[in-house]
Amino acid sequence: MFRLRKLVNRLLVEGKIDQNTEVHIEFARELNDANKRNAIALFVKENQSANDEARKQIITLFKKETGTDIEPTDKDILKYVLWEEQNHICLYTGKQIRISDFIGANPKFDIEHTIPRSVGGDSTKMNLTLCDSRFNREVKKTKLPVELPNHDEIMERIKEWKKKYELLDIQIRKNKKLSKGATTKEQKDTIIRKRHLLELRRDYWRGKYERFTMESVPEGFSRRQGTDISVISKYARLYLKSLFNRVYTVKGIATSDFRKIWGIQDIYSKKERINHVHHCIDAIVIACIGLDEYNKLGAYYHDEENNKWYGMSKASFKKPWATFVEDIKKIQDEILVYHYTPDNMPKQGRRRIKIDGKKILCKGDAARGSLHNDTYYGAIENDGAVKYVKRIDLASLEEKDVKNIVDDTVRSIIEAAIKEKGFKDAMASTIWMNEEKRVPIKKVRCFTPSITKPLNIRKQRDVSIKEYKQQYHVANDSNYLLALYIGTDNKGKEKREFEIVNILQAAQYYRTSNDKEVVDRHIVPIKSEHDYPFAYTLKIGTMVLLYEKSPNEVWDATIKERNRRLYKVTGLSTMRMKGRNGEYAYATVKLIHNEEARPSKDIKAKNGEYEQGEEFRPAIIMLHTQLNALVQGYDFEINELGEIRRLR
């Protein structure tokens, strides 16, 4: 909503719109008719009845089992419903669950997210189960069910869910046949409502079951984004109506229909979820759908059916203007995608706390961002060098970790078990350190070759005599900024040096107690080690325009060519490389093209400096010595309309 306000204000200031401008806003695609709304109401009523019954049963069963009265909370009721769905067993461990195991002061079973929230899972009942607390926290963690060693056992425990939705599928097909034979509208509506209700039940059980079979989380899986868009659309419409005289709603499904009717679906399909420009294409289509188009849509579909069934003349729909399709094809070459990436790190934290029963707004030091990864690493001396290790639960051990097990004896026992049973079966069974004394191997210490220079965040309480054991060691999560210094040596040759600041260092700098002026370049020295002057800083989200030899290449380029050079910084890191005179440190910068809409993991980045006329690279990784670029905030700015303004 904030960005919408900024955009509207800019358009008003530049005189491109006024209060008489007609505004079209798209609402969610899922449009429910009366029968579907009726079925949803019945489904909600069913769930409410189940919750009411759960409340009664909790009071009765908990009293019977513990002799104690209890007033169930909403969370208790949710747990009870999940308990019933699972036939009173933990799906992950097979343990029987009593009601006192999950209700009361110290529950042994957690509500667990089948698809972890960190990878897109939501908190709907479809994505929740009741799980053994220890298993959830020590083994399941943020894994998908298919990644667990006992996945086959889990699937055996939920086979009834599959039978449920398959049976509902059969009933739905029968209802579809019945609706075709209905003789009155009332009869047909009744059958359709029943079918919708069966579909809601089927979708619930199928969704719950299929979450246990997902090998990866598909894009768009989470329902949260769709819900957010619906809410934003609702409030955006109210906001726009406060200024504009004519604000019309366009149904989402109509946008899809008109893309096909006007012949731009093929163009759209090529860009959808790959290129941010597809949002612009949608916006143009939405702007062209008015009341007249809606009124003619029914006649178009009538003509289309007559053509399909009876061979009558082909249906047609006049395009908004003669060259509509051709202009849409050119749109990608004519626009620059504007990315808004706010820097929240310097913002002061604010929290309301209770003092003497009153809520008071307090300001303080609150870092915005992950300071470091969660895992703590131990330090040990091995072969005359300090190496870093971490403890891993045996159930979470991956095959590649086996060779890194620190203890030779433990490693040989585990390798023997793997050789005998195979990796998956060995991890699912008990591996004995001493079978005679019934001592199992539960956790192992493994070397972590990737951790060579961890962050030392604080001192241990019990200080060891060995210096390398006196600190808590953690891995850096991400870097905040990269400062680049550019100068010349005695021979007039360009030289570059850099400073990189991680989130933890930035948080320490921006603490309000430091009483420092908050300016990026003050975090790093004004000059580098060899006295090279400060050039600029890069942060995640900073936009850059690449050039090969001279900045004039950018300013002399066409809009299309300039667009090809516009990238966004998505990663900052360091690496060490060997040279003739020893080992050198380099900063690496990952760039993704401004129009690229795919997740980073789906884009293969290519290394190397930019060259004019090169084959287009959606993602690039460069060393700080290779980066030739104009930088947002220093050399240029981009406004909300995607217009570039030169700064120097």
Image: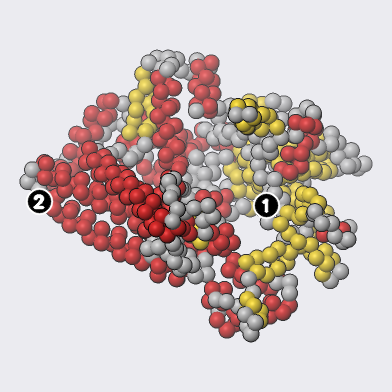
Query: Is residue 443 positioned above or below 23 on the image?
Result: below
Q: Residue 288 at what x, y percent from top left?
A: 35, 28
Which is more toward the observer, 409 or 215? 409
Q: Residue 406 at what x, y percent from top left?
A: 73, 71
Local SS, label 2: loop
Q: Residue 220 at what x, y percent from top left?
A: 45, 47
Name the mark on residue 181. Answer: 2
Q: Residue 498 at what x, y percent from top left?
A: 80, 43
Disc 1 from disc 2: Cα separation? 62 Å
Local SS, label 1: loop
Residue at 40%, 63% (x, y): give it: 88
Could you tell me the amino acid type at mark 2? Gly
Query: Is residue 554 positioned above or below 216 on the image?
Result: above
Could you tell me the amino acid type at mark 1? Asn
Badge 2: few (under 14), some or many (20 or more) residues near its Cα, within 10 Å?
few
* Left or right of 145 in this view: 443: right
Residue at 57%, 73% (x, y): give it: 427
Residue at 64%, 85% (x, y): give it: 436
Q: Furthest-front residue in view?
A: 67
User: Which dot, 1 or 2, sits closer to the camera?
Assistant: 1
* Left or right of 266 in this view: 581: right
Q: The C terminus appears in which quarter of the rendering?
A: top right
Residue identified by numbered label 1: 373
Name the mark on residue 400. Answer: none
